[in-house]
């Protein structure tokens, strides 16, 4: 692909802006790890929420979506659309509680909720497990996507692509801390959205595509279904119907049972980091709600449009993920190519920047400061954080060379966390969960995966049914075979967090406190939330691929759910928090 001087100027301008943001926030990040990892707990909702969206908008996501719609039609996106059920659960059930906890990371929560050696072991293990191998795998697939983009567009080999992309991001993230990351995320998200919308616009205008009408004529009808279609592959081999069993696994199991970064129903990972960085409980809830709406309703359709166009333009290409980038390479006019490449760099950097800061927070706060250097001063921990960020950057880059498929990495993460999601939800709402429950839920999927791979031919997503059942059995058995946390510790946790629901009634009585708040109103909020999200998502899809009249029922449902949520949140009493 040939880039003009203007293209290069756009790319250079983007990098200069991001570097300027990193330098500008260097002093704040240097004041202590509270600023380095949590921005001093002062983020407004719109900035924290946009940072969440930008982080999940990685260079890999448009490519994966293009591959999904090529193989399973639009309904193939249920592999991640199902998580809207969990994201809305996080909004109403967990955002307030995370901000109320007043901790540095979600891993630190382990020793707030549990006590003793088991809690200490679990905190250290999760810090290293999530901060190192899991973080490397995530960075590896994001690097792989960026490498594919630069290979197709610039002809760069994987080593060059990874070194250039990762080095700049690592340096920028290490100097700026979370403040620089989230402000950069805001700029990067805006640029990435402009780029993907522009690419969809130009792709649809191509004579070979012929707009939406051309896509409808060229591709099988099942390609455009929002829900799965029972059937076999289309005779052209261009589009497959999403198997109903897969849809059931995604909607009935995956969203609550599996751990996946950014899509946990309990709001963990970097989503929890942004929740805890918000000004107060209200900003935490609004940030997570804005993230959920933008993530599921606004972003997917430009990717889907380009993915469908790539099927028409490149029907014989085997790598459907790379076909997305080929549209950029072959059909964007001069000037727009530089903007689109800059938008991919923006999407890439917003994700890698967060992964480096998030993973580093585990290594430093939950392992190094907790178990190695417990009494060092703040400048020491900030310096250690910057060095660790660069080390994580290098090891994440190395992981890239052992991956070949982004989707396979996604599926591995979902399988390896199958079943732990329920523990992460219930530990907030049921006093009987203990540290050994989580340990069992972490270990059981590994045993289950090994058995399925060695002795059966069960594949993803059907494997989720077996893994979730096995993991749930294991952690429930361990829970009832091991003693609960000490009553004094449970009372202290309850008085600090004030979780609702019948699962804490026994502890409230023991503490001489009023009964816990009922969770019925939270269930109503949650139901209204996912109705709004799915109605808006499919309403936009109906407007694009069908008619304005077809989108009206979705629009009405979204409007009714939105009004209900606005009224309920406006009347909500918010618990004051400090620090």
Image: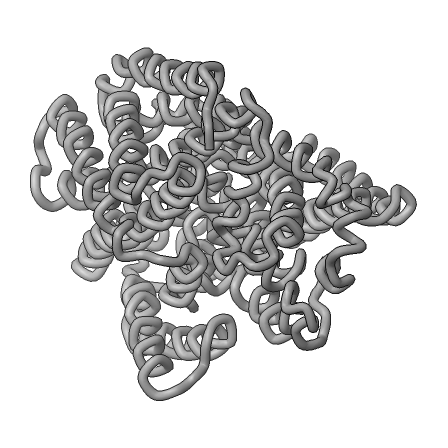
Instruction: Say which of 220 and 82 sits in front.
Output: 220
Q: How is the image coloured?
A: one colour
Residue drawn at 48 percent across, 34 percent down = 54
Closer to the camera in the image, 489 or 162: 162
Quick check: 181 above or below 516? above
In front here: 111 or 373? 373
Q: How many marks?
A: 0
Residue lying farthest to the bottom in this orientation: 455
Give the percent coordinates (x, y) of residue 127.
24, 50
Q: Residue at coordinates 63% horizontally, 32% vertically from top-left?
A: 197
Between residue 238 and residue 343, name the one nearer to us: 238
Placement of the C terminus among the 4 image quadrants: top left
* Image height of 405 relative to 288, above or below: below
- Residue occupying the point 25% across, 51% down: 399
Q: Residue at x 71, y 75 (%)?
A: 230
Residue 567, horizontal then vertical, whole percent = 74, 34
Tell me the quarter of the picture where residue 501 sits. bottom right
In the displayed structure, would residue 122 be above or below residue 1?
below
Does residue 275 appear in this view?
no
Residue 398 lies, in percent from the top left, at 21, 48
Residue 300 visible, this angle: yes
Image coordinates of residue 184 in percent, x first then y, are: 42, 23
Please indicate whether residue 336 sits to the left or right of residue 405 in the image: right
Q: Is residue 328 above or below residue 467?
A: above
């Amino acid at each position: 692909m040939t880039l003009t001087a203007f293209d290069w100027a756009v790319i250079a301008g983007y990098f200069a802006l991001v570097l300027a943001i990193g330098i500008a926030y260097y002093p704040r990040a240097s004041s202590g790890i509270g600023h380095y990892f949590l921005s001093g707990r002062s983020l407004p909702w719109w900035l924290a929420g946009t940072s969440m969206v930008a982080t999940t908008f990685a260079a890999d996501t448009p490519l994966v979506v293009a591959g999904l719609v090529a193989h399973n039609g639009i309904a193939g996106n249920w592999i991640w659309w199902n998580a809207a059920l969990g994201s809305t659960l996080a909004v109403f059930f967990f955002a307030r509680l995370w901000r109320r906890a007043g901790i540095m990371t979600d891993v630190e929560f382990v020793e707030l909720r549990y006590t003793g050696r088991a809690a200490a072991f679990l905190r250290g293990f999760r810090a290293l497990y999530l901060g190192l191998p899991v973080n490397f795998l995530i960075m590896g697939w994001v690097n792989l996507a960026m490498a594919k983009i630069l290979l197709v567009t610039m002809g760069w080999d994987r080593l060059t692509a990874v070194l250039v992309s990762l080095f700049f991001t690592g340096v920028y993230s290490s100097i700026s801390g979370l403040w620089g990351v989230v402000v950069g995320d805001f700029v990067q998200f805006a640029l990435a959205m402009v780029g993907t919308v522009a690419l969809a616009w130009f792709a649809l205008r191509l004579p070979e595509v012929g707009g939406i009408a051309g896509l409808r004529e060229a591709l099988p009808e099942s390609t455009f279904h929002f829900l799965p279609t029972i059937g076999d592959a289309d005779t052209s081999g261009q589009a497959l119907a999403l198997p109903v069993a897969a849809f059931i696994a995604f909607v009935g199991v995956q969203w609550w049972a599996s751990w996946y970064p950014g899509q946990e129903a309990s709001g963990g990972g970097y989503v929890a980091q942004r929740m805890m960085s918000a000004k107060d409980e209200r900003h935490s809830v609004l940030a997570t709600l804005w993230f959920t709406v933008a993530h599921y309703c606004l972003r997917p359709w430009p990717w889907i449009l380009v993915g469908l166009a790539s099927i028409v333009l490149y029907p014989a290409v085997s790598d459907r993920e790379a076909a997305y980038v080929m549209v950029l390479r072959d059909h964007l006019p001069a000037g727009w190519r530089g903007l689109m490449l800059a938008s991919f760099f923006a999407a890439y950097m917003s994700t890698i920047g967060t992964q480096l800061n998030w993973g580093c927070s585990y290594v430093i706060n939950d392992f190094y400061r907790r178990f190695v250097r417990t009494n060092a001063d703040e400048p020491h921990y900030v310096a250690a954080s910057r060095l660790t960020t660069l080390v994580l950057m290098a090891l994440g880059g190395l992981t890239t060379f052992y991956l070949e498929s982004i989707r396979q990495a996604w599926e591995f993460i979902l399988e390896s966390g199958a079943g732990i999601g329920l523990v992460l939800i219930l530990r907030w709402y049921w006093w009987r969960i203990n540290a050994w429950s989580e340990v069992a839920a972490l270990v059981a999927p590994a045993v289950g995966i090994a058995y399925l791979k060695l002795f059966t031919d069960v594949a993803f997503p059907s494997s989720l049914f077996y893994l979730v059942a096995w993991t749930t059995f294991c952690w429930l058995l361990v829970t009832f075979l091991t003693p609960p946390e000490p009553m004094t510790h449970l009372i202290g946790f309850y008085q600090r967090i004030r979780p609702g629901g019948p699962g804490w009634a026994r502890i409230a009585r023991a503490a001489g406190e009023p009964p816990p708040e009922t969770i019925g109103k939270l269930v109503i909020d949650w139901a209204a939330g996912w109705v709004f999200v799915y109605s808006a998502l499919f309403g936009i899809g109906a407007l694009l691929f069908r008619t304005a009249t077809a989108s009206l029922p979705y629009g009405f449902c979204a409007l009714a759910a939105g009004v209900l949520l606005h009224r309920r949140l406006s009347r909500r009493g918010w618990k004051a928090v400090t620090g």
